[in-house]
Image (cartoon, grey):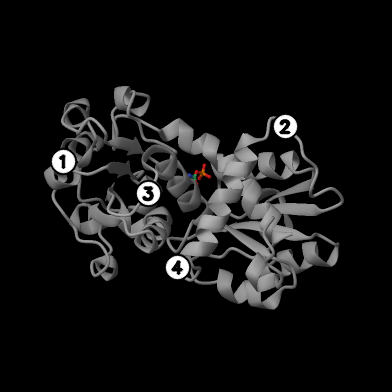
Amino acid sequence: MMTATSIKERSLLGLKDISRDEIQSILNRASYWEAQTDKVIPVLNQKFAVNMFFENSTRTRFSFEMAEKRLGAEVMNFTSASSSVEKGESIYDTVRTLESMGVDVGVIRLKPSGVLQELAERVSIPLVNAGDGNNEHPTQALLDLYTMQKVFGDLNGLTVSIIGDIKHSRVARSDLWALRKFGARVQFCAPVNMQAPELAEYAPYVSMDQALKSDVVMMLRVQLERHHQGLFSSNAQYREHYGLTEERAARLSGHTIIMHPAPVNRNVEIDDAVVECSRSVIFHQMSNGVPIRMAVMERAI
Ligand code: CP
């Protein structure tokens, strides 16, 4: 059982500023939760968790809800489309409203980057970041590290290629910050208009051929909704240059695993047949999201 105490310590806003030991303790606790055979162990009995999603989600929202219910918490779900946000209420007033009703912890996904930190400083309940703009998605990176540790054990010296829309990816950022703490070498591969130049000092940009020579190939979703004018005239053209096609997947080393945070654009950044091939751990990542979020919610309350 972890012993974090203050609201700040119990919150999880990102992985950039937390220690390797703290990350490892969450991963260890997730391993404990994964090993439990009882579906519900009510350590959060009498606690109220609210999942506040100001942006769409399937995996993160449902795995938080699953985690909270498996821990016996009372769960409330908030989606902005059916709330007073539609009438112009601010994110801050929404969170304060739920806090004033006695909620114990808030899970929050936000469209903009850079507002979560300030929000967390203004409220009196722990907040867990379920993805904020292109800033961080800490629980996704935790489940990614957990998945990698289950396959490889020690992450020190591992080469991880993250391929695709780095510019808009909070997953790439959280994975980068966390993997560096564990001694893994991260490299990016992306067309110029999907690169984040400010990250180049931490992870080099390499060619697609070079990116395939790694222990982990992590494909990112092309965020079609965020690209108003693309470098590529079609999905087929993107796939040709940056997709993990069947032909490219066949060139990977025998031990290399394929990851993707999902949702997946099949036959754009990754071929349909590759999504569920034997070296793909994409659905294992989704399974691992539940014990990771159990560990994070237990820590938060
Ligand atoms: N990986 C991820 O964050 O998926 P969702 O957007 O469906 O939550």
- Calculate the distance from the C-alpha at mark 3 to the C-alpha at mark 2: 29 Å
Q: Is residue 281 left or right of residue 57?
A: left
Q: CA distance from mark 2 to mark 4?
A: 32 Å
> In the image, is the residue at mark 3 within 8 Å of ligand 1 by its beta carbon?
no
The earlier-in-sequence mark between 4 and 1 is: 4
Q: Report the front residue among 270 and 23.
A: 23
**Residue beneath the point at 57% across and 69% down:** 116
Say what amino acid the circle numbered 3 marks. Answer: Asp
Q: Secondary structure at mark 1?
A: helix
Residue shown at the point (38%, 59%) measured from the top left? 182
Q: Which of the two marks, 4 or 3, is nearer to us in this view? A: 3
- Disc 2 on helix, strand or loop? loop
In the picture, residue 97 is in which quadrant? bottom right
Is tag 1's residue or tag 3's residue first in the polypeptide sequence? 3
Q: CA distance from mark 1 to mark 3?
A: 32 Å
Q: Which residue is mark 2?
A: 39
Q: Amino acid at mark 1?
A: His
How far across and down, in percent of the image, does residue 202 sit? 27, 67
Residue shown at 57%/73% (left/top)? Answer: 117
Q: Amino acid at mark 2?
A: Lys
Percent position (x, y) of residue 100?
A: 83, 67
From the viewer's perspective, is the residue at label 3 or at label 2 nearer? 3
Task: Give the residue pinned by disc 3.
Answer: 154
Give 145 or 191, whichever is nearer the viewer.
Answer: 145
Residue at image mark 1? 241
Q: Vertically, is 122 above or below 94?
A: below
* Depth order, front residue of 182/241: 182
